[in-house]
Image: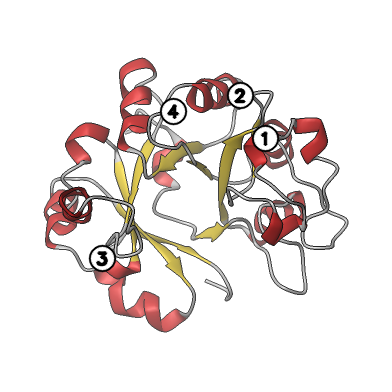
């Protein structure tokens, strides 16, 4: 029987997903076309991050600030897409890609997990631009992210898009009120997000709430697994892994 999400649903479970592409210190940098090409060649899925440029383009980049990966000052959101694409990634020949050119490169060769880096209170513009792009993509994909209201935006407007709610223990989120941290760590925001699967940090696995949801049919993907022993310890309570730094 064909699932309503087609190949994307089956590819949630296998193969493993390369975190920010199949990058390495001596190879292509994270979130680069080279890293995505390497993941496709190795037969892995791809996880990547997107955020909006100053002129509203969906750029593939993780950090809010440019310094770590490009050496440039300031924030991504304050520069245009054309300006951002002049910046070298990690002193390589790679440049920051757009989501549009990334999906054109990948095609149908890999399942793509698109993590929306939507700040709280700013849901809408990034989601809309991402949907405009993925509507014309014929390969398997899903959207993921930590902001439950971003998921609710998709659930209300485009319920046919496969969605995975990211979460973790929130110990590294001191800016959050304690009540909100506790609620998110206990997955109470699942009701807001209405996801089809969970993408959970290793610091909250195993989770009794996740186990209960999984028993009801909601898959669990673990992130970010950086060595085989980490996966061995939690694979009994998960359906797949997002990994980096080793051959999964």
Dot 1: element: helix
Looking at marks 2 and 1 on the same chain, the residue that comes earlier in the sequence is marked by 1
Question: Which residue carries the number 4 mark?
Answer: 122
Q: Say whether marks 3 and 1 touch (CB < 8 Å).
A: no
Question: Which residue carries the number 1 mark?
Answer: 78
Q: Which colour scheme is used?
A: secondary structure
Q: Say whether marks 4 and 1 touch (CB < 8 Å).
A: no
Front one among 222 and 201: 201
Residue 189 can be seen, yes or no = yes
Looking at marks 3 and 2 on the same chain, the residue that comes earlier in the sequence is marked by 2
Observer-side mark, 4 or 2, equals: 4
Front one among 85 and 54: 54
Q: Say whether marks 3 and 2 touch (CB < 8 Å).
A: no
Question: Which residue carries the number 3 mark?
Answer: 204
Residue 17 location (% of width, % of height): 51, 57
Quadrant assignment, res 168: bottom left
Observer-side mark, 3 or 1, equals: 1
Residue 181 location (% of width, % of height): 22, 53
Residue 167 location (% of width, % of height): 31, 53
Quadrant assignment, res 203: bottom left
Q: Say whether marks 4 and 2 touch (CB < 8 Å).
A: no
The quarter of the rendered structure image containing the N terminus is top left
Question: Which residue carries the number 2 mark?
Answer: 133
Looking at marks 4 and 1 on the same chain, the residue that comes earlier in the sequence is marked by 1
How far apart are the two marked residues, 3 and 4, measured between alpha carbons?
27 Å
How far apart are the two marked residues, 3 and 1, measured between alpha carbons?
34 Å
Residue 3 can be seen, yes or no = no
């Amino acid at each position: 029987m064909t699932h309503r999400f087609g190949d994307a649903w089956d590819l949630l479970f296998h193969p493993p997903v390369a975190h920010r592409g199949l990058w390495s210190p001596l190879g292509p940098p994270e979130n680069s076309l080279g890293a995505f090409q390497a993941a496709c060649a190795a037969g892995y899925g791809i996880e990547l991050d997107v955020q909006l440029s100053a002129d509203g383009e969906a750029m593939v980049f993780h950090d809010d600030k440019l310094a770590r990966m490009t050496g440039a000052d300031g924030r991504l959101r304050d520069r245009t897409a054309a300006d951002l694409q002049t910046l070298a990634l990690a002193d390589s020949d790679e440049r920051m890609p757009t989501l549009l050119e990334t999906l054109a490169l990948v095609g149908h060769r890999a399942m793509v997990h698109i993590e929306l880096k939507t700040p709280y209170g700013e849901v809408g513009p990034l989601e809309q631009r991402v949907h405009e792009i993925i509507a014309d993509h014929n390969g398997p994909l899903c959207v993921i992210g930590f902001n439950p209201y971003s998921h609710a935006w998709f659930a209300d407007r485009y319920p046919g898009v496969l969605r995975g709610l990211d979460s973790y223990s929130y110990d590294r989120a001191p800016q959050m009120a304690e009540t909100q941290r506790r609620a998110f760590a206990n997955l109470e925001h699942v009701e807001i997000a209405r996801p089809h699967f969970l993408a959970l940090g290793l610091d909250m696995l195993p989770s009794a709430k996740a186990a209960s949801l999984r028993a009801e049919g909601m898959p669990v993907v673990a992130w970010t697994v950086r060595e085989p022993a980490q996966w061995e310890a939690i694979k009994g309570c998960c359906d797949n892994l997002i990994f980096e730094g080793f051959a999964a």
